[in-house]
Image (cartoon, rainbow, N blue to C red):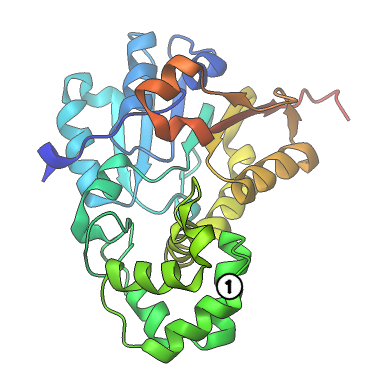
Amino acid sequence: MAEEFVHISVLREELVDGLGIRDDGHYLDVTLGGGGHTELILQRSPTCRVTSVDRDAMAIEAASARLKGFGDRLTIVRSNFAEFDPQGQKFDGIIADLGVSSAQFDQGDRGFSFRMDAPLDMRMDQRQDLSAADIVNRYGEKALADIFYEYGEERLARKIAKKIVNQRPIHTTKELENIVFYTYHPKARKGRLHPATKVFQALRIAVNGELDALKGLLDKAPQWLNPGGKIGIISFHSLEDRIVKNTFKGHDLLRVITKKPIMATEEETQQNPRARSAKLRFAETKNITED
């Protein structure tokens, strides 16, 4: 339900400021979420337009209600951003917030978090078949270990994978959390980071093909920009940030604007702890005379 979808956009001002919104500009938000970034862009100019993309039906419903006052200045498309087709349109700026929405974490039945007991789902788009339960219960031990190590940088990936295979079937977030928790040595269970955090991150990335989608976006998006157009990406873990940083640096059409990522202020992290790990990087299209 739309009223249940509440999401606090991180680095909101920094992201929109970096675009340099201009009158009559056309901007692309490939991660609509709760609509916070799109809303701020539309508020910056009475004549700019935004095309916004999301694959989560609940996010689209909530954002559509929130942003209905902007009328035909806003176009919303339901799609995975890696599969989005601009149909020849060019944009003056493109943004992406790669974080999972607060509402997705807080809604137990989505299965993104181990804070609540729920079915192992983790699908951003409920239309897709593959869920976290499918991976946990069907993939072989080596495949599971590779996912946990590659996408979660989990040092106990092999041990966790072995325990999962031995204790299948596993149906809920709490069942999986307990397996990971008790794989860790008792002394290591009391750290700042919950032992299951990396495994849940890895599964979410695998279920939704997040890193491949990001690579696909970064490969195509610069071609959608007008001359001087800017692209800003907010990432939340080192795997994403590394891909953004290296792609911006190596792309023939882009010039890096942010040598170091923009981070949330202490004030923002106090209000929204999830902003603490956010990193924002900007690039812009090169002039034709640039190498």
- Give coordinates of residue 166: x percent, y percent: 43, 91
Towards the viewer: 257 or 184: 184
The residue under label 1 is 157
Q: Is mark 1 on a helix, strand or loop?
A: helix
The residue that appears at 44% across and 24% down in the rendered structure is 269
The residue that appears at 35% across and 22% down in the rendered structure is 271
Q: Which residue lies furthest to the front in this view?
A: 187
* Apparent side of residue 52 relative to residue 288 in the rendered image (left or right): left
Towards the viewer: 14 or 186: 186
At label 1, which amino acid type do we have?
Answer: Ala
Quadrant location, the C terminus: top right
- Give coordinates of residue 248: x percent, y percent: 72, 38
Towards the viewer: 73 or 53: 53
Up-down relation of residue 3 to residue 283 (above or below): below
Towards the viewer: 251 or 266: 266
> Is residue 10 among the parts visible in the rendering?
yes
* Apparent side of residue 4 relative to residue 60 in the rendered image (left or right): left
* Apparent side of residue 52 relative to residue 250 in the rendered image (left or right): left
> Is residue 12 among the parts visible in the rendering?
no
The residue that appears at 47% across and 83% down in the rendered structure is 163
Q: Which residue lies furthest to the right in this view?
A: 291
The residue that appears at 19% across and 40% down in the rendered structure is 5
- Give coordinates of residue 15: x percent, y percent: 50, 22
- Give coordinates of residue 225: x percent, y percent: 59, 32
